[in-house]
């Protein structure tokens, strides 16, 4: 009886010892240090942001005007270019981050892209959306105050 | 009587014209079939004096305006609050139908309120001092009319002239011709409207609002039969978006009324300046 009990305990112990390393690995995979690696990876990829992110016009379809500030940042020092859709706006040589002030003038959303010079790969992008107060109406608008 | 028959005849002809337009839809541009609507809340600080003698603005409610407005369009039928859009009078919305709607011109039939009515009793109650010229005077109803309007659109310019009869829908038996020119300047996100207008009111209209009947006459207001009158307007109005739901508006209108208005014992102002600063919430 004693033998049988000791055999079962030994088996359970071995089983625990077998699974413990995997449990530790599993905990390690979910550890903060692993998440930090992901964050670092994200941080390392180039970032392109714009302020403000939207432009509001009075009527749908009308050109919207605003001054936007675009900020980009990368881990690598290199030659980077900023594009408005397919149009090259500006390039920077041997740079890692920079700021550009742009006069936004459009009736539609416009996306800005960050690319390396002489490369077709989009590193980062951001979109300025165009909104409106009054939607388009088939009736011509007339205004008269009093 | 003959005048009312003429108005009815014009509207019958207009109805025929509308039907003809529908039949000729392949060759003539009829009103768009799209449906659109917008509901708005307006809040404004206003300076809007009246030309009635000794009636002054007092109290904060005389300087604040809150209104609801609806723009609705369906197959040529529309409700639009074009006049006093940011004012306090919801009934000022016009209801109409586009008989002809070309790219550069249009003809509408419509109904709207052209002149605000007034109640001497309530006006006196709102004042700090008595107004003997208004005391005991009968109420004047608002001047609702039916009209035909011709509009001409050239780029950012709009000219419209409308002929309205007030005799069918209101006690202000008479007619008026209202013309208005508006030029839109778009500067960045601003819409700036420069406008000018001329309105001629028939003698019956002016007599209803500013005339004094024999039974209304007393020592402060002698009997008075008013002649037709002219109003000239010049205005500047600007609007700017704040967000997708809010916009800011400001405007000023200068009015000049002809001498026949000032001849009335009920009126004492010939030049009236109206000012508005407000915001609009669009749903």
Image (cartoon, coloured by chain):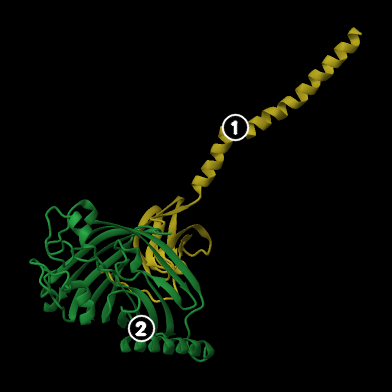
Chain colours: A yellow, B green
- Which of B85 and A44 lies nearest the eye of the viewer? B85
Whether labels 1 and 2 belong to a single chain: the reply is no
In this picture, residue B125 sits left or right of residue B129: right
> Disc 1 sits on a residue from what chain?
A
State the residue at coordinates (36%, 69%). Answer: B93
> Disc 2 sits on a residue from what chain?
B
Question: Split into 4 quadrants, where in the image is the N terminus of chain B?
Answer: bottom left
Is B228 drawn above or below residue B240 in the view shown? below
Q: Is residue A101 in view from this perspective?
A: no
Tag 1 near tag 2, CB within 8 Å: no
State the residue at coordinates (16%, 78%). Answer: B226
Category of crowding for the residue at label 2, using alpha-carbon neighbours closer than 10 angstroms: few (below 14), some (14–19), many (at least 20): many
Category of crowding for the residue at label 1, using alpha-carbon neighbours closer than 10 angstroms: few (below 14), some (14–19), many (at least 20): few
Q: Residue furthest right?
A: A1
Residue A106, quarter of picture: bottom left
- Which of A62 and B23 lies nearest the eye of the viewer? B23
Q: Secondary structure at mark 1?
A: loop
Q: Residue furthest left?
A: B219
Residue placed under numbered mark 1 in the picture:
A31
The location of residue B6, given as percent across then percent down, is: 35, 89
Q: Is residue A3 in view from this perspective?
A: yes
Is A40 drawn above or below residue B68 in the view shown? above
- Distance from disc 1 to disc 2, alpha carbons, whole Å, reads 77 Å
User: Which is more foreground, mark 1 or mark 2?
Assistant: 2
Question: Split into 4 quadrants, where in the image is the C terminus of chain B?
Answer: bottom left
Residue placed under numbered mark 2 in the picture:
B148
């Amino acid at each position: 009886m004693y033998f049988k009990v000791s055999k079962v305990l030994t088996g359970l112990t071995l089983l625990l010892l077998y699974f413990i390393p995997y449990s530790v690995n599993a905990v390690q995979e979910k550890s903060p240090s692993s998440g930090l690696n992901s964050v670092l990876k994200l941080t390392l990829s180039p970032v392109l942001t714009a302020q403000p992110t939207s432009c509001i016009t009075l009527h749908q379809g009308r050109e919207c005007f605003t001054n936007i500030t675009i900020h980009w940042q990368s881990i690598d020092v290199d030659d980077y270019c900023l594009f408005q859709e397919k149009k090259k706006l500006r390039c920077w040589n041997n740079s890692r981050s920079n700021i550009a002030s742009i006069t936004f003038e459009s009736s539609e959303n416009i996306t800005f892209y960050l690319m390396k010079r002489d490369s077709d790969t989009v590193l980062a992008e951001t979109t300025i959306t165009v909104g409106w107060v009054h939607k388009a109406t088939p009736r011509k608008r007339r205004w008269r105050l009093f | 009587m003959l005048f009312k028959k003429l108005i009815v005849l014009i509207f019958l002809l207009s109805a025929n014209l509308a039907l003809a337009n529908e039949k000729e839809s392949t060759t003539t541009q009829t009103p768009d079939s799209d449906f659109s609507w917008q509901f708005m809340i307006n809040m404004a600080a206003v300076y809007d004096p009246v030309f009635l003698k000794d009636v002054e603005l007092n109290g904060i409610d005389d300087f604040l305006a809150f209104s609801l407005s609806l723009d609705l369009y369906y197959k040529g039928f529309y409700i639009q609050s074009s006049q006093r859009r940011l004012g306090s009078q919801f009934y000022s919305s016009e209801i109409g139908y586009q008989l002809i709607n070309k790219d550069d011109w249009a003809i509408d039939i419509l109904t709207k309120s052209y002149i605000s009515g007034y109640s001497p009793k309530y006006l006196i109650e709102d004042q700090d001092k008595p107004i003997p010229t208004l005391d005991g005077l009968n109420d004047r109803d608002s001047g609702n009319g039916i009209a035909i309007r011709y509009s001409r659109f050239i780029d950012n310019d709009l000219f419209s002239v409308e002929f309205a009869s007030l005799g069918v829908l209101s006690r202000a038996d008479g007619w008026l011709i209202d013309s208005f020119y508006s030029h839109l300047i778009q500067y960045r996100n601003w819409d700036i409207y420069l406008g000018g207008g001329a309105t001629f009111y028939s003698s019956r209209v002016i007599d209803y609002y500013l005339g004094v009947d024999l039974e209304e006459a007393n020592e402060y207001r002698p009997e008075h039969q008013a002649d037709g009158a002219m109003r000239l307007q010049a205005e500047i109005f600007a609007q700017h978006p704040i967000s997708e739901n809010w916009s800011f508006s400001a405007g000023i209108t200068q009015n000049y009324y002809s001498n026949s208005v000032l001849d009335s014992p009920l009126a004492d102002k010939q030049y009236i300046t109206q000012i508005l600063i407000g915001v609009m919430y669009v749903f």
